[in-house]
Image (cartoon, grey):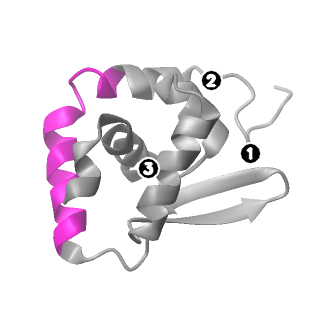
Amino acid sequence: MAALAQPIRLRALMLLLREGELCVCELTHALAAPQPTISRHLAQLRELAVVADRRAGHWVYYRLHEELPDWVAQVLRQVAVGAHTQEPYLSDQAALSDMPNRPGTPCCA
């Protein structure tokens, strides 16, 4: 699948596979890329029905498309098995985990 050939798209998909659903701001933070770049790649994945989105107020959340063909889901899972301990995927996950003020998290402890 050509959509996986671009590194930012693949990195975003690895995070979505692991997290389930992420806001554009979370992906921007984790991937250390400008919001327009992330949004452009997510739009391309949405057009290919690889991801789906939902809006909640100012936030736009993305997840793997619920009708993703099984073979595509299998490819993503296999890539994740090999990539989860490799760079840049390891750093992406760490950056996401360290992100302050993530949407949906309590603002006070």
Task: Write the start and end of the magenta stretch as one range.
Answer: 71-90
Residue at the spot of label 3 = 16
Left or right of residue 72: residue 99? right
Question: From what the image shows, is residue 85 above or below residue 70?
Answer: above
Q: Secondary structure at mark 2?
A: loop
Where does residue 92 sit, x and y in percent of width and height?
41, 26
Chain-order first, disc 3 or disc 1: 3
Sort mark 2 into few (<14), some (14-19) or many (20+) by Cα contacts within 10 Å: some
Chain-order first, disc 3 or disc 2: 3
- The answer to which of 3 and 12 lies nearer the viewer is 3
Chain-order first, disc 1 or disc 2: 2
Question: From what the image shows, is residue 32 above or below residue 71?
Answer: above
Res 26 → quadrant: top right
Quadrant in which the N terminus is drawn? bottom left
Specify whether residue 89 is painted magenta: yes
Left or right of residue 2: residue 53? right
Where does residue 33 sit, x and y in percent of width and height?
52, 26
Residue at the spot of label 2 = 99
The residue at the point 80 percent across, 36 percent down is 106
